[in-house]
Amino acid sequence: MQALRQKVNADRIAERIEELAKCSTTERGVTRLSFTKESETANELVAGWMREAGMSVRRDELNNIIGRYEGNQPDAPALLIGSHLDSVIEAGKYDGILGVIAGIEVVQTLFENGIRPKHPIEVIGFCDEEGTRFHTTLLGSRAIAGDLQEEDLQAKDAKGITLADAMKEIGLDPANYRLAARDPKTLLGYLELHIEQGPVLEQMNQACGVVSGIAGQSRYQFRVEGLAGHAGTVPVPMRKDALVGTAEMIQAIERSALQHENLVATVGKLSVSPGASNVIPGLVEGTLDIRSIDDEIRLAALNSILEECKSICERRGLACEFSKVMESPAVPCSSRLIEAISSVLEERNMKSVQIVSGAGHDAMAVAAITEIGMIFVRCKDGLSHHPDEFATTEDMGVGASVLLDVVLKLTS
């Protein structure tokens, strides 16, 4: 293992990420939606690099790109390494992409050194994790986990094109989507390398960390209805101001989040009507996002928030309605894989810091069929989903080296 540490090619990782960044519909940042010309170009590039790394390559029934590096025992369960190749609008270069390219680099390092582990290794570029085009997330990984539903095929993009139609446009038969599902008995585990998208590693001055789990999420839309009126003629004590009521609700939400160290709550979007400078706001619509690695804490905080918001609105003479958009439980990473990653970090003179991922990842879906482990790589200012998202070549090389060592521990 020591001899291999110097052979991970960090420059090659950086160069490939730059090449993929060109597969974009926008010049600012990266915009690469699933089942488009840009995503197909990216798939071709990734498939070529997989072949260069000694892998056989196939496209599954939902357009996930899969490279397989055979082991000495081809029938042994395979270790999966993956992340996604799609992006949000005007995204950075590294989100998702780093995990795929680092996975290829790990296999290419083995291939160039003539090493065949006992277990096969598969690198997966998932087709759609972000959900930007069809507004439904984890399409590729849910298909592999066997959790994709037939109704998902009818999800539509902004132009009214369904997922099923988009699949047909690139030569896939949507009726075959179930064939992408993998048999858990054939899998050894799943590893995902990802930029942290947060500030912890940068504050620690450390290149990598191990993920303990992925936070559960509750997402709601809310509607607060009051009474619009003339801004100059209605006395403040007599108003039913929907925006002021919403502002008090937001403060209550923040107070609730501050009571728990591992809970975050966000009101990320507000729409105010009528939206005129001389009219008292009569209607506010918004979103609530609550996340925690502890589902019990998250659900208790959610119930408390809903009750307090209801009380605020009743006191102010406002009508308040919350509608659930999404509910997903927390997903813990495998203790076995956390231990393997932690031991490698310590061997490389890093602290085995465990970080909770507040963002969702393909690993969430894959956890339904096999053990999952995640490695975070430091990113500048913890910034992600933004054109200025950045990870240094050196840190990416360290991350790929950690991934390589973990792979060797698990597959040898």
Image: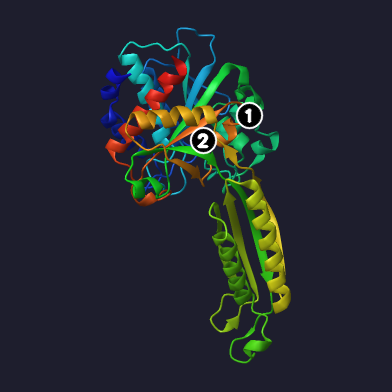
Neighbor class of circle 1 (other Cα within 10 Å; few <14, some 14-19, many 20+) is some
Q: Quarter of the image containing the N terminus?
A: top left
Q: Which mark is residue 35?
A: 2
Q: Residues within 10 Å of mark 2 (few under 14, many from 20)?
A: many
**Which one is nearer the viewer's eye here, 377 or 219?**
377
Q: Quadrant of residue 177?
A: top right
Q: Residue at x 38, y 20 (%)?
A: 107
Comparing 357 with 164, the one in front is 357
Q: Position of residue 321 (x, y in %)?
A: 71, 64
Whole-percent x, y for residue 98 in the image: 39, 35
Indicate the secondary structure of the residue bearing disc 1: helix
Decide if residue 258 is on the left or right side of residue 23.
right
Determine the image quadrant of residue 352.
top left
Cα gap from disc 2 to disc 1, whole angstroms? 13 Å
The residue tagged with tag 2: helix, strand or loop? loop
Q: Amino acid at mark 2?
A: Phe
Q: Which residue is mark 1?
A: 174
